[in-house]
Amino acid sequence: MSRERDSLLDPAGTTGAAAHAARGPRPAGPKAAGPKAAGPKAKAAALAVNEPRANRILGRLAQEKAAPPPVVPPALDGEVGSVVDGERRRGRGAVSNAAGRFEPAARIVFDDGWQSLEDLPPLRTQVTEERARTVITRNQSPDVAFDRSINAYRGCEHGCVYCFARPTHAYHGLSAGLDFETKLFVKPDAPELLARELSQASYQPRVIAMGTNTDPYQPIEKRYEVTRRLLEVLAEFGHPVGIVTKSGLVARDIDILAPMAEKGLVKVAISITTLDPHLARTMEPRAASPHVRLGTIRRLADAGIPTAVLTAPLIPALNDMEVERILDAAKAAGASEAGYVMLRLPLEIADLFREWLVTHFPDKARHVLGLIRQMHGGKDYDSAFGKRMRGDGPYAWTVGRRFEIAARRLGLAGRGLKLTTAHFRRPKPAGVQLSLFD
């Protein structure tokens, strides 16, 4: 209710008309004195009678104008009070940190009038060591070309706002927003667990995927080197592996990857979402820049490592117009295959992406979201197999045909290189005599 309307209420809460009736007939003033009351003298008399009230109104208006605006908890489309101040989240992707979907209560941050929010420190990356029982994850999805994967890390410091792995942080009681990119988990014993699982007599080798949930070469890999040690185990067993990353750090392990590539045991896909460095920094704040990723393709290709370019995700009206340019640049850098995935917005990602879009691209937000819904039957996301990775409808069909035409023109289309399991061997434990055919 506005202040103007409040002024029409008497202390008992009655309306202005009711208040007049309660007070009885109004005494005759200068205005009721007849036709001559409209003269200058009558007006001056009326102003003199109303002067105290006029002064009160003017004084109140002056106070309201001078007072600072009320502090309102920041909120976009997400949970009220979950949006984090821009200075605190500098260099991060998500703009909010709403409680996980399984939590019985939510913490709401707001300024209590003492400017307490200004005292909060910037968000720092925290890493927790996790002791897992197994390291190989299985899946039966018909939308992907592998049935097993390894993820050495939970959460990802790259901060890609669209990352479909964000909702998994809810299983740890954490937010899919800023928690996902600041509170990370590492499995330091993953290489030992992998060696144990590959050594089991019942294990049947097939291509293992790395980078399907979180990036195996995110910044903390420099310190922990879990991915490198996993590759050493796979190389020792002669086991095929496919890697997806958007980091230039993968080139560090060329000494392991190149010998594996000679045996048909490895291929690497570099994800490039845009060639615009500003858009890349906004979407993927702590990932390698586009020119670094192109340079990484060149280094891997020069080392004889089969390298693909993955344009994922394609976001309508934001980066999908770059499809042809990305494929052209990747081909010139040495890529031999190409793939794409349309934007996916499962669970919390829909709200996170909407907040991010309104914050950074308010003029495009309505158009982008409208096209996304066109591709998913009027919804933010359709999880049906066969549709979730590509979308449906005229717009999705057009983007897909553009990609296919460009990939075919550049020689990047086709089924791609098939990795082999012919070199798989279980190393014999120390002290065990080798057989004649080993």
Image (tube, rainbow, N blue to C red):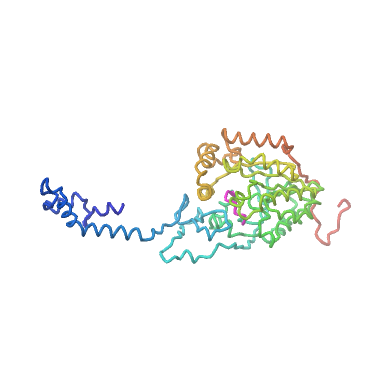
Residue 187 pos. (x, y %): 66, 59
Task: Give me the residue at 83% from left, 59% from top.
Answer: 432
Is residue 194 shown in magenta? no
Answer with left or right where residue 330 lies relative to residue 33: right
Task: Give me the residue at 50% from left, 37% from top.
Answer: 378
Secondary structure predominantly adopted by residues drawn in magenta = loop
Vertical arrangement, residue 352 with respect to residue 191, above or below: above
> In the rendered image, is residue 134 in sight?
no
Residue occupying the far top of the picture? 394
> In the rendered image, is residue 14 in sight?
yes
Q: Nearer the viewer, residue 432 or 254?
A: 254
Q: Nearer the viewer, residue 221 or 83?
A: 83
Q: What's the magenta region?
A: 157-163
Residue 57 pos. (x, y %): 26, 57
Answer with left or right where residue 223 lies relative to residue 370: right
Is residue 162 shown in magenta? yes
Residue occupying the far front of the picture? 40
